[in-house]
Amino acid sequence: DMWCFGVLLYFLCTGKQLFNVDTKEDVDDEDLLRICEWDDAWKQEKLSKVDKMWPRRLLESLLQKDPSNRPESWNVVVDELNRQSSNSDNIVYDRIVIFQSSPLVYRHENNDILPLPELDFNQESTMLRGALGDAAQKGCTVDVILETGSLDRLNAFMAQQMSQVMHFSGHGSQNYMAWEDERGKVKMIFEEDLRRQILGIGEFLKCVFISACHSEWVGQAFVDAGVPHAVCCPVAERLQDIAAIEFTRSFYRALACQRTLLHAFELAKRAVIDSPHVQNAEEEASKFLLLPDRGDDYHDVPIFFASPVRAIQDEPTRTKDVGVPRSRELLVGRNVLKYSILSNLSPESSTDAVRVYGPEDLGKTALVAEVCNHILQRPRSPPQLDYIFWFPSTSKMHDDDSLYDSISSFVSVIIQNDSNKDDNLRQLRHSIAEVAHQKSLLLIFDTREYEKHYNGETSNLLHNAIDTLLEVSKARYSKVILISEKPSTQSTTSLREEPVPVSALDFESAVTLFAHRIPDDLRWRYPELNSRKKLEKLINYLDPPEEAEGFLEHDDQWWDRYDEMWERFFGSGVPSRCCNIARRVSDRDIERLINWWDPVVEDSPDDDDFPSIVE
């Protein structure tokens, strides 16, 4: 009953249903899966659509997946409603805007496109909302606005004066800030450019937190632009990821609970020191700086809830997606491919379709799904799409999916070539053009599923269907992604294709994927697999660069041992095989791996128990 009341209250607050249903009141298959996997991320996505702030706290408790975490009795709900009714004027509300910059690639001086390390912001977003939720229990609500770390969004932030508190998460450098461009390439902003960019930001911004290594010069630039307070890290220092997380959680929790900036800063440093997961904790805590250095009294001031909050004017485009697979695993080693696909999806590109192809089990579906998620996570950044449709989909359709249904039927009619083809196509053309006119679409077709479903080669017919579809849709902007195991052999259609071949992972990516997929208890016991810096050392140990001393002297026996390791532990770079091996390794396996090139001791009789592709 508590859950049902939460669903009804959500509808009253938003005018929208929490889950999609058809005309028979049956929940959509894809939303059924969301209910089964209901977690804080899904809940916060839904609650972000609640305009009034006070129902959100009540909805937080009513829409808990675990019944034991919901209100114990209706008295709790009634008391909360009465309290909000009588004290609505006393509710305090503020906002923090978080810029998350995770560029996929950078351009090397020799003009090669090279990958950048992947940043996982899901953990940061969940952690921040959890920390601020503690303050909400006291009636102090701080809303979290996640923004793409691009200069366009920074300009919008300054123009609208969205918040008095700004947070930046991204890669750090002693010489530049790493922002994103609209295609996922790094945009290097050097000090002089940054100072011009943020001129006048001190007129409304009270505090900035630069959560990146080597960020002292960035904090100083904001202070010189008039921002009273900046949290950053010394130029010569690198931060441990876990230390940054512990500091950030405690810092914002304290600020939201109406502690002063100085008090929150000291509490956050203490949290780092007390954390059992941070190595050299006291040294790591000392890396956080509070600028400017004007004595303690200067920073002993409140930050949140000091003045009214402006409304956000540019609401993001709500992209409707149907059939896109949901993957919660971090994709490793595919940044250059993601960038290539996104570049070809740009409105400026003359490409009609991108063909993602390669042998089975290389993660083509996961790659394309991640490209879709990349776009969905950046609703205010190009390309701003009205629809992302994945064909074929096993999800049950409902009334809101009429365009998806029409496109799916249109393609099927052409492939099947049935007797009523002309009449059916005429009706479908009209339905598609009516809805898709002046809209922007991204259509994904898994050609392997079509061939499997129709028992034969459908490539020519599918191409003809897509070619005709793009012509009749009259969409303002439309792009297509094709997933297949072979490159295109088509020359009969006007579809302009760009091939994106997918191959096995390189050695560094395979080792990184392996380290992410081993059981958590093993990863914590072996720092070589739990620290980015130590993982880099392990990679150089296992796969020494060509310029390393003695590299050219490696004999056939050395290469045989190398191939054995590559296959046994990393599945020869095939992602699915690498993950399967990682999930069942033991301490003995890890010991063997991290000492692979040490003098070999006589193998024990059960040496065959090590991970094996055959197994």
Image (cartoon, helix red, strand yellow):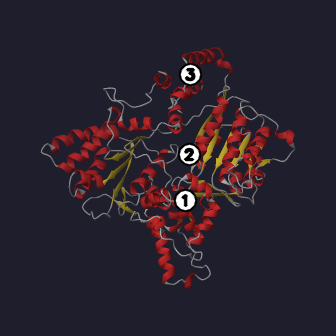
Which image quadrant is residue 312 in? top right
Q: Residue furthest left?
A: 419
Q: How far, Cα to Cα, is label 1 from label 3?
A: 42 Å
Q: Look at label 1 and name its amino acid.
A: Ala
Q: Which residue is mark 1?
A: 515
Which image quadrant is residue 204 in? top right
**Residue at 25 percent of width and 53 percent of height:** 452
Q: In the rendered view, would you say 362 is above or below 330?
A: below
Which of the two discs, 2 and 3, sits closer to the camera?
3
Q: Nearer the viewer, residue 417 or 76?
A: 76
Dot 3 alpha-carbon crowd within 10 angstroms: few under 14, some 14 to 19, many 20 or more: few
Q: Nearer the viewer, residue 311 or 117?
A: 117
Q: Look at label 3 and name its amino acid.
A: Glu
Residue 10 spot, x, y in % from top left = 49, 25
Secondary element at image label 3: loop
Q: Which residue is mark 2?
A: 122
Secondary element at image label 2: helix
Q: In the rendered view, would you say 385 is above or below 190?
A: above
Residue 579 spot, x, y in % from top left = 46, 58
- Quadrant containing the C terminus is bottom left
Q: Earlier in the sequence, mark 2 or mark 1?
A: 2
Q: Earlier in the sequence, mark 1 or mark 3?
A: 3
Residue 546 spot, x, y in % from top left = 57, 78
Side (left or right) of 197 relative to 27: right
Tally of numbered discs:
3
Q: Which residue is mark 3?
A: 72
Secondary element at image label 1: helix
